């Protein structure tokens, strides 16, 4: 089968570690499903793998790709009852857990120390004609969405959903600041928050990206920089927002700290601009600000996300769609942070 995969990691030219060619077709084992992939979306995880930035050692070559939508091709032995039958349009939940640790037993498997996702330690990724996943992680594709749109709901939309509604516990009528409009995660957060009736403020140094945020439903936009926090306080009667969705890091951290209300939350799911901003501990304890880390989301949260997307008729924003053979061009655009919305491979 055709696939895009890493043959090496690290070095001065990470994209040279990418190959597009033939790989063995996988076979579904007990309790697994083989999916004929129709679309897969890019995430920074794919580029980091090429750079050699991985949480655990992986065996090379390794097919990249964390998200997928497609068609059920077949099931291995002992498929559970109630899974979509072969030929069904489906979307894949991309995580896998040990099922044995305290975190798995206590209901938040995202705290499992041995969790992995597609293209990680023991799982090939989705940038291929076929991908094999646990059968219980195969869910019906939202009927309104194309394969390309549905594939966007994996890593990025699930991360945004958990940040907004699980970690920050935002409800209609509250306020949120989304930093870094309009990459994949920020466009997802803006879209979901606005659809949920949360007053949504988007911030970016790019006027073009702020216009995109408005089209996605942001109620207000603020240019990033020195005066951003002052403008946000002005929009919230001097109180600040209930929560900040932070994935940029060093360039936006000072604004996030000054823009959140006393007792509010800053939810962190990345640091694309730098991981080590000044902590400003005095502000944290004096204003009782909650700093909350967030990673991906559980299967139950993914199911809740899919229901919300269907009920609210949400359509993810796609920047560009590339054929699999042009995966290098797609990753180059991702690495340059040029995309507005999600980058998709059509397979």
Image (cartoon, grey):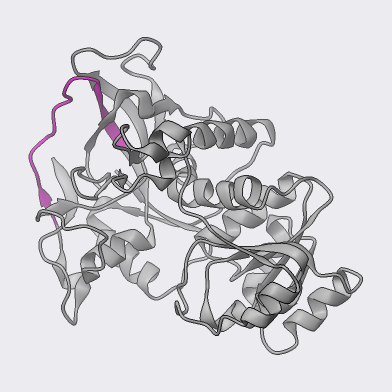
Pick the quarter of the image with the C terminus: top left
Q: Position of residue 153 (x, y in %)?
A: 49, 43
Relative side of 136 to 271, left or right: left
Residue 229 found in image quarter: bottom right
Q: Position of residue 163 (x, y in %)?
A: 58, 53
The magenta stretch is 20-37
Pick the quarter of the image with the N terminus: top left
Q: Is residue 94 magenta?
A: no
Relative side of 280 to 232, left or right: left
Q: Is residue 27 magenta?
A: yes
Say which residue appears at 58% left-offset and 47% top-offset: 161
- Is residue 92 shown to the viewer in this render? no
Say which residue appears at 21% left-offset and 73% top-offset: 14
Q: Is residue 258 above or below residue 263?
A: below
Q: Is residue 125 above or below residue 29?
A: below
In the displayed image of the protein, which residue is found farthest to the top? 81
Say which residue appears at 32% left-offset and 32% top-offset: 99
Frontmost residue, 196 versus 170: 170
Say which residue appears at 29% left-offset and 28% top-offset: 134
Residue 282 found in image quarter: bottom right
Frontmost residue, 151 versus 231: 231
Q: Position of residue 274 (x, y in %)?
A: 45, 79
Residue 18 found in image quarter: bottom left
């Amino acid at each position: 089968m055709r696939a895009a995969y890493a043959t090496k990691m690290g070095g001065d030219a990470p994209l040279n570690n990418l190959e597009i060619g033939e790989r063995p077709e996988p076979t579904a084992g007990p309790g697994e499903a083989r999916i004929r992939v129709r679309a897969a979306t890019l995430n920074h995880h794919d580029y980091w793998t090429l750079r050699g930035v991985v949480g655990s050692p992986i065996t090379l070559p390794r097919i990249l790709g964390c998200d997928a939508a497609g068609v059920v091709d077949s099931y291995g032995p002992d498929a559970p009852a109630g899974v979509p039958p072969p030929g069904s349009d489906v979307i894949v939940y991309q995580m896998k857990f040990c099922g044995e640790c305290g975190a798995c037993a206590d209901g938040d498997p995202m705290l499992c120390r041995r969790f992995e996702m597609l293209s990680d330690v023991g799982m090939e990724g989705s940038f291929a004609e076929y991908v094999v996943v646990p059968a219980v992680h195969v869910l019906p594709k939202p009927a309104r969405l194309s394969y390309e749109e549905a594939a966007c709901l994996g890593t990025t939309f699930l991360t945004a959903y958990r940040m907004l509604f699980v970690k920050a516990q935002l409800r209609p009528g509250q306020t949120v600041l989304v930093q870094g409009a309009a990459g994949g995660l920020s466009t997802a957060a803006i879209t979901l928050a606005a659809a949920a009736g949360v007053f949504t403020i988007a911030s970016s140094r790019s006027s073009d990206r702020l216009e995109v945020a408005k089209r996605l439903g942001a109620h207000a936009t603020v240019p990033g920089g020195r005066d951003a926090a002052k403008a946000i306080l002005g929009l919230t009667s001097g109180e600040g927002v209930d929560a900040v969705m932070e994935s940029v890091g060093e360039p936006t951290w000072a604004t996030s700290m000054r823009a959140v209300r006393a007792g509010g939350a800053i939810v962190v799911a990345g640091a694309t601009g730098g991981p080590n901003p000044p902590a400003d501990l005095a502000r944290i304890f004096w204003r009782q600000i909650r700093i909350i880390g967030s990673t991906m989301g559980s299967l139950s949260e993914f199911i809740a996300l899919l229901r919300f997307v269907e009920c609210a008729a949400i359509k993810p924003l796609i920047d560009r769609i590339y054929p699999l053979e042009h995966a290098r061009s797609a990753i180059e655009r991702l690495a340059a942070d040029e995309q507005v919305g999600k980058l998709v491979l059509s397979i």
